[in-house]
Amino acid sequence: MSELRRALELNPLDPLFSSLMGYLFHVTRQFERAIAQLHSAIELNPNFYLPHWLLSVTYVQIRRFDEAVAAAEKANELSGRHSMTLGGLGRVYALAGRTAEARQLLEELQRQRRAGYVPPSFLAYIHRGLGELDQGMEWIARGVQERDLNIVVTLKTEPGYDHLRSHPAFQALLTKMNLQS
């Protein structure tokens, strides 16, 4: 956190650093601070998809699903339908009760994965949103095996994994990665 604060002091207009600070607030469960920081990042560059995507992830944590959907849709539009934003949007749709749309995005990601590399985390997002925890855990385990940074870097700290922390397979992955407390 101190290093990122220093980076923002040196370059206060950088939307990436501002977005990353918002994410640090998110992982430390300071959700309102994360939202404010991510809105600041969006003001710096409204066309940068990352703060919109992170905003959707944060809104999910506080169950503000309408706002999460709007932010995820904007991130997906700005990213050109990047697999990360498709997975995030699918998860948000599922959590917002828009199951058919979530399943369509899951199918789209599965087609993309057959044609090229799509990180397993993005499929896990949607399965978790749909409440399909075993399938979500399978994709998370595959992500650990494939060294998917969206999983290996966030597995210990991401609040979005809180509902899985007591799952035996999740605990086994933490042990495998030497991340047990």
Image: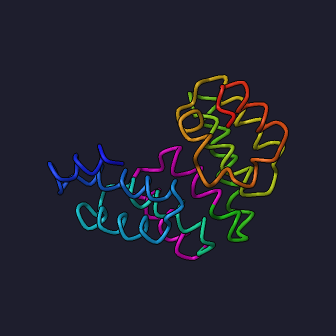
In this picture the colour scheme is rainbow
Front residue (pair 145, 30) = 30
Is-magenta flag for residue 71?
yes
What residue span does the magenta drawing correspond to?
A: 65-91
Front residue (pair 109, 41) = 41
Please provide percent x and percent y for residue 9: 17, 53
Residue shown at 60% from the left, 66% from the top: 60
Residue shown at 69% from the left, 58% from the top: 102
Q: Is residue 128 left or right of residue 113?
A: right
Q: Main secondary structure of the magenta part?
A: helix
Residue shown at 67% from the left, 43% from the top: 123
Please provide percent x and percent y for residue 114: 65, 29
The image quarter in which residue 160 lies: bottom right
Q: Is residue 45 left or right of residue 156?
A: left
Is-magenta flag for residue 121?
no
Residue at the limit of the structure toward the front, as seen here: 181
Residue 33, compared with residue 178, is above or below; it is below
Location of the C terminus (image quadrant): top right
Residue 69, compared with residue 109, is above or below; it is below
Residue 171, compared with residue 67, is above or below; it is above
Please provide percent x and percent y for residue 167: 83, 44
Residue shown at 42% from the left, 50% from the top: 80
Q: Is residue 176 left or right of residue 147?
A: right
The image quarter in which residue 172 lies: top right
Please provide percent x and percent y for residue 177: 66, 26
The image quarter in which residue 171 lies: top right
